[in-house]
Image (spheres, rainbow, N blue to C red):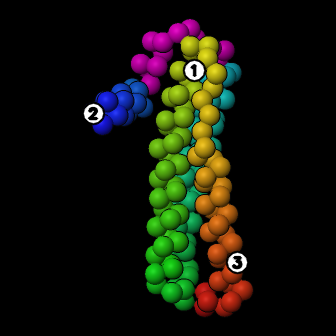
Amino acid sequence: MIDGLRSLGAAVRLWLSPARVREEGTTPDYRFSLANERTLLAWLRTGLALVGGGFAVDQFLPGLHPWLRVTFTVFLLVCGALCAVRAVNHWVRCERAMRRGTDLPVSRFPSLLALGVGALAVAMVVLVALGWTR
């Protein structure tokens, strides 16, 4: 557990001080670093869209049963927050891998996020079809 906290602390320090990433390995082709930044920004936009979706569910579906509305809202807000944290973590991991000349890291997060959002969309379609959103 203590090692896990140290590892998390080291990761957060890298997130907050990206210049430290440059201390490792060799500088990759700048186009790859810029592509990595664009991916970071895309994930941040996704997170922001999920947060906006959470607020939209809360504000624009007052007829939905309160526990369902709160569940959907919290789910979307948590997914948005996780996207933002995952974006920074993945950016650092990819940048370090490129500098070290190793394989880029893989992640299950995109698949899990897609499944979660897809399940939420199916649930919303069912609720709309049943007329429970009025």
Query: 57 left or right of 8?
Result: right
> Disc 3 or disc 2, which is closer to the eye?
2
Q: Position of residue 74 (x, y in %)?
A: 46, 67
Please state, as top left, top right, bottom left or bottom right, where the C terminus lies in the image. Answer: bottom right
- Classify residue 18 by image quadrant: top left
User: Mark 3 highlights which residue?
Assistant: 125
> Disc 2 or disc 1, which is closer to the eye?
2
Q: Farthest residue in the left direction?
A: 2
Residue in the image at 36% along x and 30% along y? 7
Amino acid marked by disc 1:
Ala
Residue in the image at 63% along x and 26% along y? 104
User: Mark 2 highlights which residue?
Assistant: 2
Amino acid marked by disc 2:
Ile
Query: 118 left or right of 21?
Result: right
Q: Farthest residue in the top direction?
A: 26
Residue 97 circle label: 1
- Seen from the viewer's position, the closer of residues 130 and 49 is 130
On screen, 84 above or below 73?
A: above
Q: Which region is colored magenta?
A: 18-30
Residue in the image at 60% along x and 54% along y? 113
- Seen from the viewer's position, the closer of residues 16 and 118 is 118
Q: Measure how far apart labels 1 and 3 are at the Cα level.
A: 41 Å
Amino acid marked by disc 3:
Val
